Image (cartoon, rainbow, N blue to C red):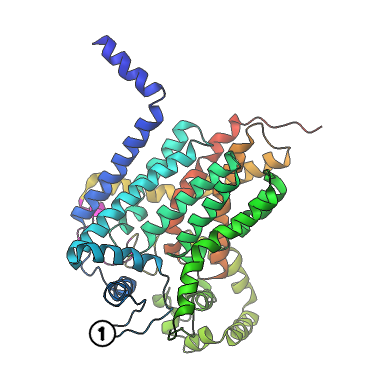
Amino acid sequence: MKNSNSKLKGIFQGKYKKSILSILIFILAFGIRLSYMKKTIVPNPFMKDSGVYLSYAKNLVQYNTFSKSKGPNPVPDNLCETGYPFFIAAFLKVFKDLNTSYAMIIFTQIILGSLTAIIVFAIGIRFLPLWAATGAAILTAFSPHLIATTSYFLTETLFTFIMTAAILIMAEALENPRPFFFFAASFIMGIACLVRPALMLFPVFIIPYVFFIKKPPKRILVSMLLILGIITAIAPWELWKKSRTTIIYDKSSLFSRALVLGFYPGLIYKTDSQKGFPYAEDKKYDEMTSDLGLAFTTLWQRAKKSPMKYLNWYIAGKPAMFWSWDVLQGYEDVYIYPVKNSLFKTSAFAGAIHKVMKILHPILIIMTMAGFAGLVLISKSGGSTSQISVDIGLLVISLLFYFTAIHTILAPLPRYSIPLRPMLYLGAFIPFMLPGLKINKRD
């Protein structure tokens, strides 16, 4: 008996430790997501954006046409990103029946959400202590936002998985700076952009660090590949659009709507009850989204009347709202669409997880900021003998800063920070990594 116990202990402490931890993390993530799916009811799963994605998917399957039109002979349009509708269409093509397809899509999202937790662990062990990498993965597994979004016909789970996988490949590229890894990371980011375009400029955002600080072999080639990878992923869709003789373009693009929505301090125009929906009261909103010249003129006129209000909104208000807990433009709390019998309300265990994670949320943000400050100080002091840990830590935090900057310009809807939760959890453990780094002494 003693021999068998010592063998088990040896396996867990030896070369299989990380594999065993990965399996346990997956089981935790999968178990709570599956329980959530079984207990929680989404009364209307095809409302708003979900219904639009479904229309696109049906038209792809029935007419091989990318259109949200309902009825025969749909006209191609360019009103939505292609990734998620194609994802849905694949299931409709295989399973034919909508109910079966819906169930399989949600189950697939449960698997993708669970695999995301493992990817977080795989990123973490490259630069954090093992216990910290495990902690970040467990936070990902138990994140109420990430759990809740698996039950929706929405982009969050798929985008989070693809983006996190891209960061893992980029971490590998920093550790083993071969041109192929940089291209592969950028290409996967391009695939993520087909689901949500916000990641489009991130490869360009990190080129200065790669080129001037990291300085990998063939850094000019690497910088070019970072751009080429994302273009290669996106180009087929752009070529498809140009091949259509009839295609509908919206005068007010997703970008212009997000930009103009971000003009309203606190996302309020007049009354607090319309917070998050200022366009419901401002008659100029539609006109501004179609004419950005008018939009900026209007912003300037309003900002001149209350300069401090607008200055505070852009410097502090927007980042604070982007990282707030409540999804705001949604049902309530972590729920984008209405739910019944949520696991977080019917299970004492799940309810406790929700409560603890909500308490931890602002603490994790502060810890991430502290970790970033520490990494900057180390870099300014001459770097570290464990420079790869610093590089990957800066990569993780740079993604958080990139998205925060994007949504400081655009609308800072908290829903769009949900896919960043895995990076936030990794960033929050960086302060625990810093004491173990040895600083290079300057000559």
Specify whether 363 is left or right of 50. Answer: right
In this rendering, the answer to whether 182 lies above or below 318 is above
Asked if the stretch drawn in magenta spans residue 9, the answer is no
Visible residue check, residue 317: no
Q: Which residue is mark 1?
A: 71
- Residue shown at the point (46%, 83%) measured from the top left: 249
Asked whether 31 or 273 is in front, the reply is 31
Q: Seen from this angle, which residue lies furthest top?
A: 2
- Residue shown at the point (63%, 45%) measured from the top left: 373
Coordinates of residue 173 in the picture (x, y in percent): 57, 44
- Dot 1: element: loop
Q: Quadrant of residue 389?
A: top right
Visible residue check, residue 168: yes
Specify whether 291 is left or right of 191. Answer: right
Coordinates of residue 330 in the picture (x, y in percent): 35, 68
Magenta span of residues = 335-346
In this rendering, the answer to whether 365 lies above or below 294 is above
> Main structural element of the magenta stretch: helix, strand or loop?
loop
Q: How many marks?
A: 1
Specify whether 16 is left or right of 310. Answer: left
Specify whether 98 is left or right of 300. Answer: left
In this rendering, the answer to whether 331 lies above or below 113 is below
What is the crowding at mark 1: few (fewer than 14 residues within 10 Å), some, or many (at least 20)? few
Asked whether 422 or 323 is in front, the reply is 422
Coordinates of residue 114 in the picture (x, y in percent): 33, 47
Instruction: Give the residue type that dot 1 points to.
Output: Gly
Instruction: Look at the image and tell me in which quarter the C terminus lies.
Output: top right
- Residue shown at the point (57%, 56%) measured from the top left: 401
Instruction: Look at the image and tell me in which quarter the N terminus lies.
Output: top left
Asked if the stretch drawn in magenta spans residue 345, the answer is yes
